[in-house]
Amino acid sequence: MLQCFRGLGKSWVTAAFVLWTLFCDRDKKIMVVSASKQRADDFSIFCQRCVLEFKWLAHMRPTDDDQRWSRVSFDIAGCRPAQSPSVKSVGISGQLTGSRADLIIADDCETPNNSATDMMREKLLQLITEFESVLTPKLDSRIVFLGTPQTTFTIYKTLHERNYVPMVWPSRYPKSLVGYEGTLAKELLDDIEKEGLDKLAWKPTDTRFSEINLLEREQSMSRSNFSLQFQLDTSLSDALKFPLKLSDFVVLPLDLKKGPSDLVWGTDKETLLDLPAVALPGDRWHRPKAVSEFIEYGQTIVAVDPSGRGKDETVAVVLSQINGFIFLRDILATQDGYSDKTLRGILTMARRYSASMCLIESNFGDGAVMELMKKHAQEMKVGMAFEEVRATTRKEDRIIDTLEPVLNQHRLVIDEKLVTWDYQSNHDMAPEERLPRMLMYQLTRMCREKGAVKHDDRVDALALGVKYFQDILAISAKEHEIHKSRQQWDNMVMGFLNAPTLATDLLVAGSDFSEPITQEEGAIFTWI
């Protein structure tokens, strides 16, 4: 079982191994299996092209038209007649029964599409067990798995438990061998034994991938995904499995009209706050190290995640932004569905904070909630735009992909009173029912597994509002750069038009520059 990070070339090397096997014994039967039929076909086509192109493989080329020589199933010259071809490609869900092979290459059988849930992984394992029935009972017969783990519960863990020999090749030498016991490739273990782990830790394992290249890949994806797909660490710690943390927030008592234009985040003892925390062990709240001047909030929005009557909550969150910082100012949560009382309560809250936009997730009610909200807004004379947002991706991935970058950059500021409110909400419920409804419990327990938390209404509404500001701020930043470039051009043009006139005036006046020149005069002569 060979686990390698993406781009290392495991399929290419294994294709060469397939040709070497046939070079040594032309009667060997090889089956290539992949998650998709096309991927398996690509492998066999590459092998066939090599036979046709390389001179030292010329003796394997077909000698007559009776020989099998299709792109997905072919024989090499000189092999004995058999029902099974020399090389055959098949998809994991294709026709495996009835085939025989001395060597089975399972190339990327696990993909995000077939391993997202427990049921999918169980079905995949059942298909894989068929390999052992296909394998011919010879001493040198073998099954070779090639792949990259797609989830922390990858099927490759199960294969290790079933006595497959693992060879794990991460992109960097690990900082610790914890989690790699008995799985790291022999070549890497020899390097560590020779030079020491302290000297090699976190250096690239392959010369084709530089430090800059790996840093670029790491920046383009989340820390948890990089650890899984490039470091092949399936035993993720809580810090990576649950990437959303309280310590990444900035806690501050917020004013109704103004907020800080800039903040300095910190997590030392001086910034630690004694506030209720329902996070994982060691995760605590912190206030900012420094706060700049207070200015008026930029745009303020209300994000609403509606629900029907029952166990789920209808949640509305109020968010504002200043200079790229997003401020969580208030939350309304109720199990009263989309009753008139609830909708009016949301509009009252929106008016109190002077919200200009109301985002409503349309997955529930298919737009009916927004129409009811508009009706109440007209009656209450609340001037606010309404916009529907429809979620199309899996909820857990959407929430983490939205909130993790903002929290990692410490751009999300929460009003101190909301921390206590969230902890004390639903106080009339039993503790086992109250805890999963808290925003911070939902946020800190959110991971990429389906059904990660029992209730996710509050964190889903927060992600809805943050996603809106992410898109708006990206557009605003681009427009700011365009405006800045235009302003620089205008200044240069004005300087070009004014400089000769001012310079001439100075020279005509007979200035010998015995007196210190002004800043404007200095700028003009520097330009000339």
Image (cartoon, rainbow, N blue to C red):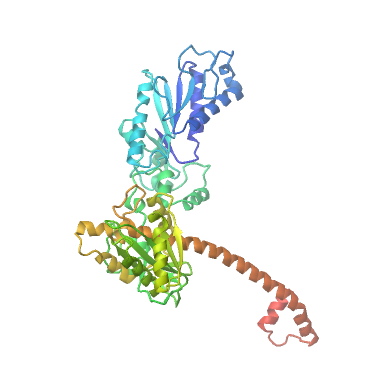
* Quarter of the C terminus within the rendering: bottom right
Residue 498: x and y in percent read 74, 78
Q: In this orientation, which residue lies closer to the viewer: 239 or 470?
A: 470
Residue 526: x and y in percent read 71, 75
The outermost residue toward the right is 508
* Quarter of the N terminus within the rendering: top left
Q: In this orientation, which residue lies closer to the viewer: 385 or 291?
A: 385
Q: Is residue 138 above or below residue 160?
A: above
Relative to 423, 492 lies left or right:
right
Relative to 76, 424 lies left or right:
left
Q: Is residue 121 above or below residue 44?
A: below
Can residue 486 be spotted in the picture? yes
Q: In this orientation, which residue lies closer to the viewer: 10 or 173?
A: 10
Residue 434: x and y in percent read 23, 60
Q: Is residue 278 above or below residue 122?
A: below
Q: How many marks?
A: 0
Residue 223: x and y in percent read 42, 52
Q: Quadrant of residue 264?
A: bottom left
Can residue 353 be spotted in the picture? no
Q: Is residue 53 above or below residue 434?
A: above
The residue shown at (49%, 41%) is 206
Relative to 33, 126 lies left or right:
left
